[in-house]
Every structure is written in structure tokens, then in C-alpha cells.
Image (cartoon, rainbow, N blue to C red):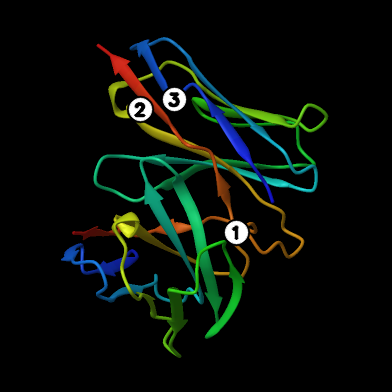
Amino acid sequence: KAGVTQTPRYLIKTRGQQVTLSCSPISGHRSVSWYQQTPGQGLQFLFEYFSETQRNKGNFPGRFSGRQFSNSRSEMNVSTLELGDSALYLCASSSIAGTSTGELFFGEGSRLTVL
Amino acid sequence: GENVEQHPSTLSVQEGDSAVIKCTYSDSASNYFPWYKQELGKGPQLIIDIRSNVGEKKDQRIAVTLNKTAKHFSLHITETQPEDSAVYFCAASYSGGGADGLTFGKGTHLIIQP
């Protein structure tokens, strides 16, 4: 059974640009969550989607957005990039809704560098 | 919102010895406490979790204890092996519809010395 797939794995952008990251969950999983990982702040929750609906959202500015498609694949977008957005963005899938109800299966992440 | 503190940030132990990582949480409503292991270049992987109606849970060499009154929980790894070297994260959340997802500690870099 294939794991969570994130693309691209690495990307470099400049300040002011925007970026779209993609996540394909494990087959059959309908919940997708996104986390930002940085050395200073650790792992921080961005948002969770279930059946194409955003269920929860973390404390991030509106520049961070996401969506989920009918096949459960998810994308997140960051507009007007800032240097502080440089991070590893992790996607996690789960078979049930709610990040506290069971195991999250994480992808290997997309490493974004903003210059 | 929830705040999770994790200690120590780095832990070095001799192979075969035990390792203990401790976490405290702030929100008494939190009722789910997972532990994730992250190896270099990979995403975190769940190794064990505990819910607030249980005080201790064990899975082979790994155990987790929870003290709800003191709001702290700990990960215990016995008979450590080289493959245990990784970064370990504790987390807390509330399964009653919380809006914050999992709140993670800052992580512990566990180093197993041969």
C-alpha cells in the first residue's frame, strides 16, 4: 500500500512569489492535515481537510490556504512568500476525521526555501 | 490554546540503557497523547499513543505513562538499540472537536552511543 506522497520534495522561491504544494493521501484515507516544521517553532498545525471541507485551522495568516479534491488529494498554497515561510511542510493522512482520533500517516515533506 | 513542553532537547544514552523523555501540557481538556519518531529525511511516524482514561501503555520496549493530575506524560524506551536514534516528538490534543489539531513538543534528539 503506497504511503503519503508529497510533491515537490524541494523547491526554492523568492520573496513575494507564491507556491503550491501537493499531497496524495494513502488510498482510502479521507482526512488530510498539513503541518509546518521549522527548527525554531517545531511542528505547527496548519489545517485539516475531510471530504473536501476544512475542519480545523491553525494560527497562521490568511496567506496560507488549502483545498481538498474529491479524490482526497490536497493542495496547500502560500501567497506573497516571506523569508520566514522557509520550512518543511508535512502532509498527513488519516482514515477518520479529527487529528486527535488516531494515527496520522505523514509524508516525507516538501522543503521550501524562500530567498 | 494548548502548550506542550518537552525535555530534554537532546539525550545521549549508551546502547542497551534506558531512555526517558518527558512532556507537560497545559490544557486539562486534552485527552489524546501520541508520540512520534522522526528519522532523518523522513516524516514523523507514530510509535505509541495513550488516551486520558489510561495511565500506562506498553508496546515491547516502548512504554508511555500519563499523570493527568500533574498534566505530564513520559516516553520510556528500554534496551535501546542503534535504530532508536532519531528525533522524538510528544503531542497532545482534545478529541472533542478541538480546532488546533495536534500540538507538538519541540522534540528530543535521542542519540544511542555504541
Can residue A2 be spotted in the picture? Answer: no
Discs 1, 3 touching: Cβ within 8 Å? no
Q: Quadrant of residue A86?
A: bottom left
Can residue A74 be spotted in the picture? Answer: yes
Please give the residue where the numbered disc 3 appears in the rendered image: B9
Which label lies toward us, 3 or 2? 3
Q: Quadrant of the C terminus of chain A?
A: bottom left
Please give the residue where the numbered disc 1 appears in the rendered image: B101
Instruction: Mark 2: give few (<14), some (14-19) or many (20+) Cα within 10 Å.
Output: some
Q: Is residue B109 left or right of residue A61?
A: left
Q: In the rendered view, would you say B83 is above or below B53?
A: above
> Which amino acid, by three-letter code, is at mark 2?
Asp
Residue placed at 41% from the left, 39% from the top?
Answer: B37
Q: Earlier in the sequence, mark 1 or mark 3?
A: 3
CA gap, disc 1 to disc 3? Answer: 23 Å
> Which amino acid, by three-letter code, is at mark 1?
Gly
Task: Indicate the position of residue B72 as horizontal and vertical percent values.
Answer: 69, 29
Q: Quadrant of residue B67?
A: top right
Q: Which dot marks residue B84?
A: 2
CA gap, disc 2 to disc 1? Answer: 27 Å
Do dots 3 and 2 share one subunit?
yes
Q: Is residue A53 left or right of residue B2?
A: left
Do dots 1 and 3 share one subunit?
yes
Task: Indicate the position of residue B5 as horizontal and vertical percent values.
Answer: 59, 32
> Which amino acid, by three-letter code, is at mark 3?
Ser
Instruction: Mark 3: give few (<14), some (14-19) or many (20+) Cα within 10 Å.
Output: some
Q: Earlier in the sequence, mark 2 or mark 1?
A: 2
